[in-house]
Image (spheres, grey):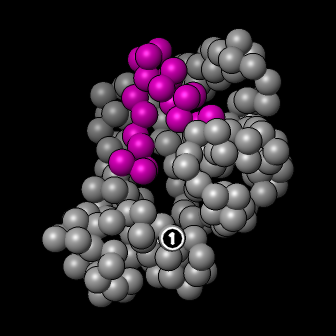
Amino acid sequence: MQGVIITGGIGTGKSTVCRRLRALGVEVIDADTIAHTLLQAHYQEIEQLFGKACVEEGVVNRKTLGEIVFSDVRARKALEALLHPKIHRAMMDAWRVFQKAGQLCVLDIPLYYETQSVYEGFKVALVYAPKAAQYARVKQRDELSDAAIHARLEAQLDIEQKRQWAEYVIDNSRDEAHLEEEIQRFYRWLKECNACK
C-alpha cells in the first residue's frame, strides 16, 4: 500500500478534507488525537518541563501549555522532543494494521514539515489555502487574539513553501463546491496510487 500523509496549516481546511475522506471510506490516522492521548499519558513529564500551571489534578491544561509553547521556541522544541518520536511510532503501528488489511488509509499530520519526521516512502498531500485565507478562517473560527493567531501562523512554515514540497496539492482557496471537487480528485488519485501496489 502506498503511504500518504495529509498535511496543511492552521485554517487551511485539512480537518474538513479528512472528514470527507472518512465519509468516502478512507481510514484517517489522526496525529493530533494520538498526540493528545500521549500528552495526557505523560502528564508528569509535562509538569516537570513546563510547570504546575500546565497540569491540573493530573489533567494537562492544553490551553496553558499552548500559550507557553507558541510563545517560546525552546519550550516548543522540548515538547516536540518528548512527543514526536512516540507519535511517529504510534502512527506507523496503526498504518501497518490497515496496510495488512488492504484498507485505504492516510496519515493526518498537521505539522508534518515542521516536525521533520521521516516517513520513508510516503507521499505528501497538502491542503492549501493562502495565508490571508488562513488568517481570516482562524479569526472566524477560534476565540484568539490577532497576536495569538499571528504567533500560530509564524510557528508554522510558510504555506507557499509547503506547496512547493508537496507531491499533491488539494486546493482550498475557493468555495465549498470547489473543495469538494478537489477532494473527489484526490480520492481518485489515492485509489490509483494503491491500485498499482
Q: Does 182 sit above or below residue 66?
A: above
Q: Which residue is drawn at 57% across and 65% down?
A: 115
Task: Check disc 1 and report its element: helix, strand or loop.
Answer: helix
Q: Does 105 sit above or below residue 20?
A: below
Residue 189 colored magenta?
no
Query: Residue 104: x, y in percent?
Result: 44, 25
- In the rendered image, which residue does mark 1 sit on? 67
Question: Please, which residue is most extreme toward the left here?
Answer: 57
Q: Does 22 sit above or below residue 68?
A: above
- Tell me if I can see residue 189 in this picture: no
Query: Residue 106: x, y in percent?
Result: 48, 35
- State the residue in front, 27 or 60: 60
- Relative horizontal placement of residue 127, taking residue 104 as reference (left or right): right
State the count of labels.
1
- Relative horizontal placement of residue 26, taking residue 96 as reference (left or right): right
- State the residue in front, 144 or 88: 144
Mark 1 residue type: Glu
Q: Which residue is drawn at 22% across and 65% down?
A: 59
Q: Residue at x 34, y 33 (%)?
A: 98
- State the residue in front, 8 or 27: 8
- State the residue in front, 99 or 70: 70
Q: Does 78 sit above or below residue 170?
A: below
Q: Find the magenta span and give its range.
A: 13-33
Query: Residue 171: x, y in percent?
Result: 76, 30
* Mark 1 burial class by Cα count in 10 Å: few <14, some 14-19, many 20+: some
Residue 26, quarter of picture: top left
